[in-house]
Image (cartoon, rainbow, N blue to C red):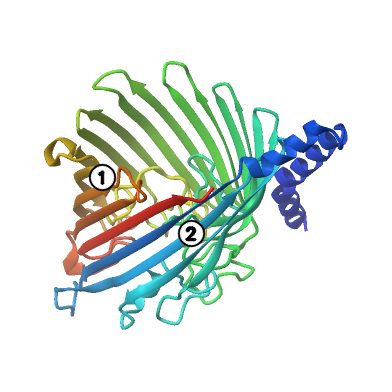
Amino acid sequence: MEKVIFKRAALSAAVVAALVAPGMALAAQDMMSPEYGKSYQAFTDDAKVTGGLFYFQRERDRKQAGPGQDGKYHSNLSHATTQAALNFNSGYAWDVVGIDLGGFGAYDLAVDESNGVNEENEFSFWGDQWGSGGDGVPENGFSLSNAALKFKFGEHVTAKGGYTQLYVPGILGVNWSYQPGTYRGGQIEGTFGGLYLTYAIADEYKAPWFKNTAGFSKSSPYASDPFSDANKIDYIHGLAARYTFENGTAITGGFGQSEGYMDSYHFKLAHKFDVLGGLNTSYQFYGSETDNNDYDGLAWQQALTASWNYAQYGFRLEGLWTKAEGDQGNYLPRLTRGYGNSQGANEIWWDSRSDWNHNDEKAVFFGVTRSLDDLVGAPGWGVGVSGAYGWDANNGDSSLEGGKEWAANFDVMYTVQDGKLKGTLFKLHYTDYNNEQDDKGSWYYPNMFSSEHDVKFHIIMPFTIL
């Protein structure tokens, strides 16, 4: 009973407090004054209607490796999917209250229905909600992504509640396809000079490949009953603080919790050096403990990052070290176990297929991008090459050791610079991913599939109506 009371009180704290305060403020105004009318008009005068049209085509082949397999590459994902999104963001009436509304539709133009993996392509829908699964093929349809009230309290504090996106640095975030995931919850944020503070809480979530929100679970979506009393998590929440110094140094600390399952911690130290045209560096720590055997003690990831630009070039160099002893065997970048049931805010993402997150695994990434404006005689073109390498992976109890994996990536990008299609992005991405233990098959290490060739083509066309 105490859990239920706490859940309800905490979940509504930001929203209820926000609702009471505007009422008190409005009571002090002359409701017939011209100033009141002008203040209300800001709701529509400052409103924006935006959206986008999207196209995604993917051909991913995975090697059928291991005992009894032919060792050849076979189709793993094959689909072409389009999406359309529309969002309304109001201004603040009386400089206090507004609304955000948004939704999107997804439709598969082509899909290999003979391969059940395509139902989880992440750009169309896989069932109504997390844990429901599908019928073997992806679904078309529509889904709400945003339906929330938002509030301002003076110049420094904002809050929102409803169906919305939550972000707590290093703790809570959302999954993305072209659209964001959606929590049922609330968040309050404050900025006071160089200090940023936030707290968020939710009791349901949907990744953008589900149509409806669902509760949180300690299990995977493939369990027979992921929302049984033993698996159910009533709520997740997180808080964070960041202070940015005038010299460019920023320090962030955060804490998150899923009720009855996991406590998570985050620390980040970032600094921009005034060399090489601006060298951005960071040290990042992500740590988690579970109330069961998924982790044996504190599991963690530590990262070092550096990025800088020089003339037409951009460079990234990053390193990652993971410790995740226990049954899970790899680090979860979120407050729940199953993918798509919630999402964290881990900043390390290399678009190189693997998560590079096995127990004791060390991994490095290096990438270079180049603008081609000076070579092709027209702005908007760019190319990129990158690679990642991981070693020393094991399965969490050290019975499997020394796992190695690597990937090479190539990108070509073009962004329309003017005209009616200004801002439209075309991007082709190719990954050659290699598991050096292919002879043992996929998932010999708990989060390491066999070698893949992955081709992704994106068209992203944003637009603004108001």
Q: Is residue 92 visible?
A: no
Mark sitting on residue 363: 1
Say left or right for 258 vs 117: right
Q: 432 or 48: which is nearer to us?
A: 48
Please tell me which residue is depicted at 20% across the width and 68% down the height of the picture: 440
Q: 41 or 259: which is nearer to us?
A: 41
Q: 414 or 337: which is nearer to us?
A: 414
- Which of the marked residues, 2 or 1, is nearer the chain's N terminus? 2
Say what secondary structure mark 2 lies in.
strand
- Examine the rendered structure and indicate whether residue 226 appears above or below residue 195: below
Please tell me which residue is depicted at 41% across the width and 59% down the height of the picture: 53
Please tell me which residue is depicted at 22% across the width and 69% down the height of the picture: 62
* Location of residue 346 in the rendering, given as x and y in whole percent from the top left corner: 42, 45
- Examine the rendered structure and indicate whether residue 129 appears above or below residue 420: below
Residue under label 2, please give it.
Answer: 85
Q: Amino acid at mark 2?
A: Ala
Quarter of the image where one finds residue 34 = top right
* Location of residue 297 in the rendering, given as x and y in whole percent from the top left corner: 47, 47
Quadrant showing the N terminus: bottom right
Q: CA distance from mark 2 to mark 1?
A: 36 Å
Residue extending farthest to the top is: 247
* Location of residue 458 in the rendering, given as x and y in whole percent from the top left corner: 31, 58
Mark 2 vs mark 1: give the one in front.
Answer: 2
